[in-house]
Every structure is written in C-alpha cells, then in structure tokens.
C-alpha cells in the first residue's frame, strides 16, 4: 500500500494499479511545484465536475464503475469513478486532480 500511495519514482508508481497511473506534463496544472516536470494521477484520484476542461474520448461502463478516456490538451488520461455517468464521446468535462504525485525530469518524486 505504501508503494501505491507514496511511490519514490514514476517507475515504482507505474508498477501498481489498474488502470495504470496517468503521467502528464506538470505544466498542465498551475499548482504543481516548480521542481516538478511531471505529475502522476491515479485514475480514481481525478474528480469530475470542477477544474480544467478535458474532452471525453471514450466511456466504458463497468457495472459499478465508469472508466473515461479523456484528452487534456495534447495529453491522454483515464479516470475511474464509482458513479454512473451520462457523458459520451465528444463531451467536455471539468477535472481536478486529487492526491497528485509530482516527479522531476528524471522521474524521481518531488515532495
């Protein structure tokens, strides 16, 4: 659990979790620390409904969960929510990172 919640590197963060952690340019998120060049967002740690606009590329209803594939700028990311959603391909949604993980250019964790 510690490796999942507090990984020391992108390599460690990417070893656990399904779907895999989203690794995005830190510049997409103004609140990122200056030393960070990349941000890691677990799919279940992306809140829908507020924040930055992203475009829905694909929606997968998985019973009690919904997986959405999104485009934020030029970056692709996946969200995973417990709720059913009526969003479909082409919709615009607002997203906000919850519990973001920051990494430097070498892939090491920045606190």
Image (cartoon, helix red, strand yellow):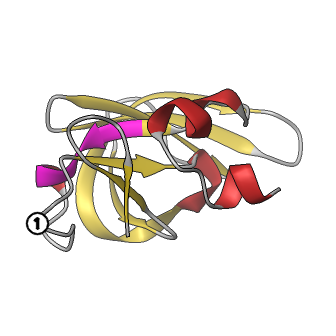
Q: Is residue 86 left or right of residue 15?
A: left
Q: Is 24 included in the stretch rendered in magenta?
A: yes
Q: How many circles with numbers are drawn on the protein?
A: 1
The residue at the point 23 percent across, 56 percent down is: 53
Image coordinates for residue 49, horizontal then vertical, percent: 43, 70
Q: Nearer the viewer, residue 35 or 82?
A: 35
Image coordinates for residue 44, horizontal then vertical, percent: 64, 54
Q: Nearer the viewer, residue 101 or 30?
A: 101
Residue 76 seen from this side: yes
Q: Is residue 34 left or right of residue 107?
A: left
For the C terminus, the quadrant is bottom left
Residue 82 seen from this side: no
Q: Main secondary structure of the magenta part?
A: strand
The magenta stretch is 23-27
Q: Is residue 67 left or right of residue 72?
A: right
Return the residue at label 1.
Answer: 34
Q: Is 74 included in the stretch rendered in magenta?
A: no
Q: Nearer the viewer, residue 76 or 32?
A: 32
The residue at the point 41 percent across, 35 percent down is: 77
Q: Secondary structure at mark 1?
A: loop
Image coordinates for residue 17, horizontal then vertical, percent: 72, 37
Q: Residue furthest right?
A: 63
The residue at the point 11 percent across, 52 percent down is: 27
Q: Is residue 58 left or right of residue 74?
A: right
Q: Is residue 38 above or below residue 51?
A: above
Q: Is residue 111 above or below residue 38?
A: below
């Amino acid at each position: 659990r510690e490796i999942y919640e507090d990984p020391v590197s992108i390599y460690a963060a990417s070893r656990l979790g399904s779907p895999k952690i989203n690794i995005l340019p830190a510049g997409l998120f103004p609140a990122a620390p200056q030393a960070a060049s990349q941000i890691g967002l677990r799919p279940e740690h992306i809140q829908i409904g507020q924040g930055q606009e992203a475009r829905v590329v694909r929606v997968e209803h998985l019973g009690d969960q919904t997986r959405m594939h999104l485009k934020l700028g030029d970056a692709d990311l996946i969200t995973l929510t417990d709720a059913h959603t009526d969003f479909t391909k082409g919709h615009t949604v607002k997203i906000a990172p919850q519990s973001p993980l920051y990494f430097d250019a070498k892939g090491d964790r920045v606190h």
